Image (cartoon, rainbow, N blue to C red):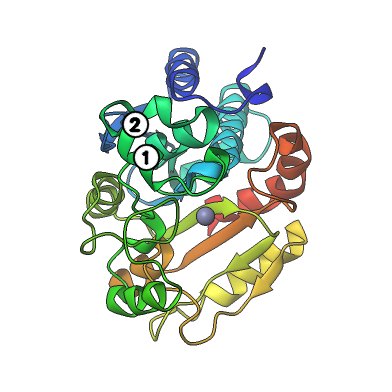
Amino acid sequence: MSFYESPPRFCALEEKLTQLVHIYPMLRRVTLGKSFLGRSISGMLLGNSQRRNFMAGAFHGQEWLTASLLVRFLEDLCHEIQSGEGPASELLAQKGLLIIPMVNPDGCEIAICGPKTAGKQQHAVEQMMTQDSRSWQANARGVDLNHNFDAGFSLCREMELKQGILCPGPRQHGGPFPHSEPETQAVVRACETYCPDCIFAFHSQGEELFYQYGNHTPKESEAIARQIAKLSGYELKKQSGLASHGGWKDWFIDTYHRPGFTIEIGKGVNPLPIESLPDIYRKLKPAMYVMCGA
Ligand SMILES: [Zn+2]
């Protein structure tokens, strides 16, 4: 069975990335950090090493399909560069790419195979579990990584409290302080090390696209977002006021004043089934080339 035909278990992802680096010499793999339970967070570097955009997925456990999607795209880019077909060679010579397929490997393992995958955290995860383990979003400590970035953290906390989220759990708890989690730190460090021009955070679901945060959304963001929306059919969403804080794109826009986007892939109920990958990918692929060049 191919990597794209079943949910991306961590060991299968590791094997796939190793295989890709072996087949495609232009691809470089870096370990950006380790998850709370010690699983590697891999970054895949391709193309121009002076200027780069980032794509990252699977911040949320049950959104593991975003990891499959990013590996699918990575493999296609590599194949295109190797064979000289398609736009990848030219695009990536202009601007390189760092792809982080799975920011939250512990959370994905919990969502795919349950708390028994959480090692020393198994008991804690079982205690925190309020619903089916398949809907787990957080990391293995019950922190929602997309609430853990340093962007409006106290406002985010206020909103959590209003919703009755008082402690670690399956979703929406931002953690004790900003960047408290090793997975968040790995992404922050990658931004500091590789200085991306532009970042794309992949989540699911809704076929929606977000590009604003606070007072520092760059002017060019809207045009890029419109182009992605046009090519994918995804709906451009404007966030108003307190709609969102603490996410990677929020922190990136706020810190660097450069374009950051959240893409909600697919439509349906999370976790989106692995069978939906080919259709989601087909619909989004043309827009993903635009993301490379943005
Ligand atoms: Zn998400």
Tell whether 254 sits left or right of 69.
left
Q: Is mark 2 within 8 Å of ligand 1?
A: no
Q: Secondary structure at mark 1?
A: helix
Residue at x-position 65% and y-position 55%: 205
- The amino acid pointed to by label 1 is Val
List the residue tagged with mark 1: 125
Residue at disc 2, secondary structure: helix
Q: Residue 10 sits in which quadrant?
A: top left
Above or below, comparing residue 83 to residue 110 in the picture: above
Q: CA distance from mark 2 to mark 1?
A: 5 Å
- Between 103 and 134, the one nearer to me in the picture: 134
> Which amino acid type is shown beneath numbered disc 2?
Gln
Q: Which of the two residues, 71 or 5, is positioned nearer the viewer here? A: 5
Dot 2 and dot 1 residues touching (CB under 8 Å): yes
> What is the x, y in percent for residue 247?
40, 64
Residue found at x 33% / y 55%: 168
Q: Residue at x 57, y 69 (%)?
A: 210
Residue 223: image location, x then y, percent: 61, 74
Determine whether 275 is above or below 227 in the image.
above
Residue where numbered disc 2 is placed = 122
Residue 256: x %, y % from top left = 31, 70
